[in-house]
């Protein structure tokens, strides 16, 4: 029976900071991997955000470094991977976490420049980081990539068009990449988080009222609020040897949001 198989490995996590205090998805994934002995390159366009993650990891006696990088810029991505290899000699794991809610609106009224910008942040960035990380994974005969999508990429019903479109692209990019690189021992999987309570959500606009938090909780099949840790634990499983036979999978972490709604009828006796 395999163990996690993570001790001594090297990971890159994009968006490993959080945009406000608290635990975001990238931060949680980085901390959880570091606990298993992974050395983690904390990539962020805002180094101060990633420095906070680094301090949390150091407090637990684990290893990470901050690498400033804008994942929409190919040269910056290439340099971030090169810095990781120069420091620790290898890359085994890539967690493509950067993503933004981005521009709103329907096809009729959305802002075209913002649409192009946000698709680059949410989709192209993941391809770019894979482009420079996969050659390093080949050198160590394998690797694991986890792309962070969203349940918004699995169904309609979102107020904007850009976010579900971009996350749907991340979903199928995962399958296409898994098919390209499986023979090289590189597994590519995806986590589709539901509405977890993270800095990305509560630092936007006027934040989130207690009423809305409660309504979100009630809407979930498990009647429980999700956190960055729930997403991070999903990532931890997929990058570990526990998932050595798992690739091309879209794994919702959503308290059942893609399975049904809390309004579904309760089970009733057979009426034959
Ligand atoms: N929170 C939710 O409810 C939820 C739900 C579904 C999916 N997601 C997904 O989770 C991911 C984000 O999770 P998080 O909690 O870590 O988010 P976050 O908003 O806290 O962002 C993490 C970091 O990304 C950095 N970043 C932004 N643009 C960047 C760029 N171009 N280059 C490098 N770094 C950049 C920010 O500086 C920030 O420190 C996104 O892909 C998002 O779509 C979140």
Image (cartoon, rainbow, N blue to C red):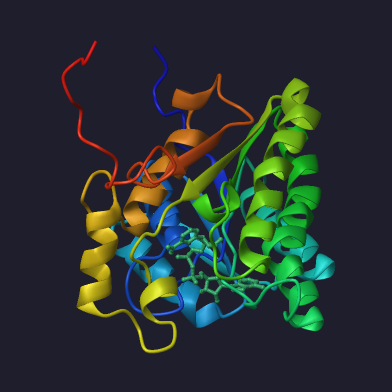
Quadrant for the N terminus, please.
top left
Position of 138 compared to 263: left or right? Answer: right
Position of 242 compared to 158: left or right? Answer: left
Q: From what the image shows, is residue 256 above or below residue 41?
A: above
Residue sitting farthest toward the left:
269
Quarter assignment of residue 249: top right
Q: Residue at x 35, y 41 (%)?
A: 256
Give residue 103's position: percent from left, percent from top. Answer: 65, 78
Observer-nearest residue: 270 or 257? 270
Observer-nearest residue: 189 or 59? 189
Give residue 191's position: percent from left, percent from top. Answer: 51, 44
Observer-nearest residue: 121 or 195? 195
Q: From what the image shows, is residue 159 above or below residue 125?
A: below
Quadrant for the C terminus, please.
top left
Quarter assignment of residue 261: top left
Q: Which residue is drawn at 29% across and 62% down?
A: 216
Give residue 187's position: percent from left, percent from top. Answer: 64, 31
Q: Can residue 37 be seen in this view?
A: no
Count all numbered tags in the image, as a single digit.
0
Observer-nearest residue: 93 or 87? 93
Q: Which residue is drawn at 75% across and 83% down?
A: 111
Residue sitting farthest toward the bottom:
206
Give residue 152's position: percent from left, percent from top. Answer: 54, 55
Position of 68 compared to 267: left or right? Answer: right
């Amino acid at each position: 029976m395999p163990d996690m198989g993570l001790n001594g490995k090297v990971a890159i996590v994009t968006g490993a900071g959080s945009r406000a205090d608290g635990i975001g998805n990238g931060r949680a994934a980085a901390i959880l991997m570091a606990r298993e002995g992974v050395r983690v390159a904390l990539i962020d366009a805002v180094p101060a955000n990633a420095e906070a993650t680094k301090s949390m990891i150091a407090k637990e006696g684990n290893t990470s470094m901050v690498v400033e990088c804008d994942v929409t810029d190919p040269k910056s991505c290439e340099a971030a991977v090169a810095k990781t290899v120069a420091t620790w000699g290898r890359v085994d794991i890539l967690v493509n976490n950067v993503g933004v809610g981005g521009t709103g609106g329907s096809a009729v009224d959305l802002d075209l420049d913002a649409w192009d910008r946000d698709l680059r942040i949410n989709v192209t960035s993941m391809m770019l980081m894979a482009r420079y990380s996969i050659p390093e994974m080949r050198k160590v005969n394998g690797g694991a990539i986890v792309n962070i999508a969203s349940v918004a990429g699995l169904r309609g019903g979102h107020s904007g068009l850009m976010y579900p479109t971009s996350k749907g692209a991340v979903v199928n990019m995962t399958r296409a990449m898994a098919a390209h690189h499986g023979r090289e021992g590189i597994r590519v999987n995806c986590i589709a988080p539901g509405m977890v309570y993270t800095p990305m959500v509560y630092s936007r606009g006027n934040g989130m009222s207690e009423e809305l938090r409660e309504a979100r909780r009630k809407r979930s099949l498990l009647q429980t609020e999700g956190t960055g840790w729930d997403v991070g634990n999903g990532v931890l499983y997929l990058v570990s040897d526990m998932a050595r036979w798992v690739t091309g999978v879209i794994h919702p972490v959503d308290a059942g949001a893609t399975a049904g709604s809390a309004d579904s009828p309760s089970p009733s006796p057979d009426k034959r």
